[in-house]
Image (cartoon, helix red, strand yellow):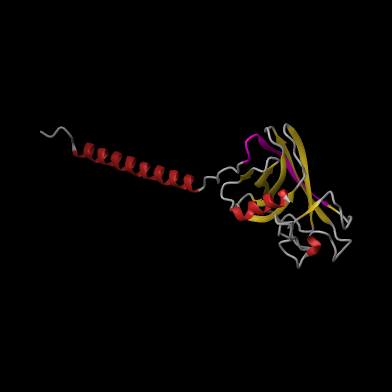
């Protein structure tokens, strides 16, 4: 006589089917989570830490201020877009407001910093879409075991999203990031963000030498 009745066999098959389906659903969920994993955290040189950063709208302001480096002041000393000098000095519109971007660095390393190429990013927190990227060069010295805020200016708005007067306010929420791309130390050594090409950093080091 068969030890298992037909209803018992059916129940066993049902349980096995449910277990297989559950395993497949867990596998699909795990794959989805892997696909949504955040990108690797941006790196900084040993002993260097980004403490805080911000931007603010200012204006109208001075046309020329030697204390502020302009956006698009490339590592080789030329502007990336010569057709838009207003973004740097306000030559075209002296009364237009400009934006100040700043990052505070703490250098616990044994070497002083002489120059930095860095990016200020504005990102859509929901879609991770990059809404604004601003590249700056700073030549202010950050000494060993020191903290210093680097400030730069730009005529460009932080984000490319512009609210039209009379329209509904944007519901987009954003996050901000600062990435150190190239760091030149006082002994001439160079640190590069992984993935940064030599074309970005070598001109900065040559400029420091000169």
Q: Is residue 46 magenta?
A: yes
Q: Is residue 13 visible?
A: yes
Along the viewing direction, whichever of 34 and 118 lies nearer the viewer: 118
Say whether residue 100 is left or right of residue 31.
right
Q: Say which residue appears at 60% left-offset and 46% top-offset.
A: 193
Say whether residue 43 is left or right of residue 76.
left
Q: Say which residue appears at 79% left-offset and 64% top-offset.
A: 85
Q: Which quadrant would residue 149 be assigned to in this image? A: top right
Q: Is residue 121 visible?
A: no
Counting from the top left corner in percent of width and height, residue 39 is at: 55, 46
Main SS, magenta region, reads: strand
- The residue most toward the bottom is 83
Counting from the top left corner in percent of width and height, residue 169 is at: 74, 57
Q: Say which residue appears at 37% left-offset and 45% top-offset.
A: 24
- In the picture shown, does residue 48 fall above or below 98? above
Q: Which quadrant would residue 54 be assigned to in this image? A: top right
Region in magenta? 44-57
User: How many numbered dots are placed on residues in this image?
Assistant: 0
Counting from the top left corner in percent of width and height, residue 173 is at: 68, 50
């Amino acid at each position: 006589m068969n030890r298992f009745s037909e209803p018992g066999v059916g129940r066993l098959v049902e349980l096995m089917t449910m277990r297989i389906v559950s395993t497949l659903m867990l596998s699909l969920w795990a794959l989805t989570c892997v696909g949504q994993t955040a990108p690797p955290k941006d790196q900084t040189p040993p002993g260097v830490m980004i403490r805080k950063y911000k931007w603010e709208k200012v204006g109208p302001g001075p046309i020329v201020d030697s204390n502020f480096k302009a956006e698009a002041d490339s590592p080789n000393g030329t502007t990336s877009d010569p057709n838009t000098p207003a973004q740097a000095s306000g030559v075209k519109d002296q009364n237009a407001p400009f934006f100040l971007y700043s990052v505070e660095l703490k250098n616990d390393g044994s070497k002083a910093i002489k120059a930095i190429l860095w990016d200020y990013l504005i990102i859509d927190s929901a879609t991770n879409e990059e809404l604004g990227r601003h590249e700056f060069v700073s030549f202010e010295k950050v000494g060993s075991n020191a903290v210093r805020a680097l400030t730069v200016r730009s005529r460009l708005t932080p984000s490319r999203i512009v609210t039209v007067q009379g329209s509904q306010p944007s519901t987009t929420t954003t996050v901000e990031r600062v990435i150190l791309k190239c760091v030149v130390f006082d002994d001439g050594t160079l640190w590069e963000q992984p993935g940064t090409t030599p074309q970005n950093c070598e001109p900065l080091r040559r400029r420091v030498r000169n």
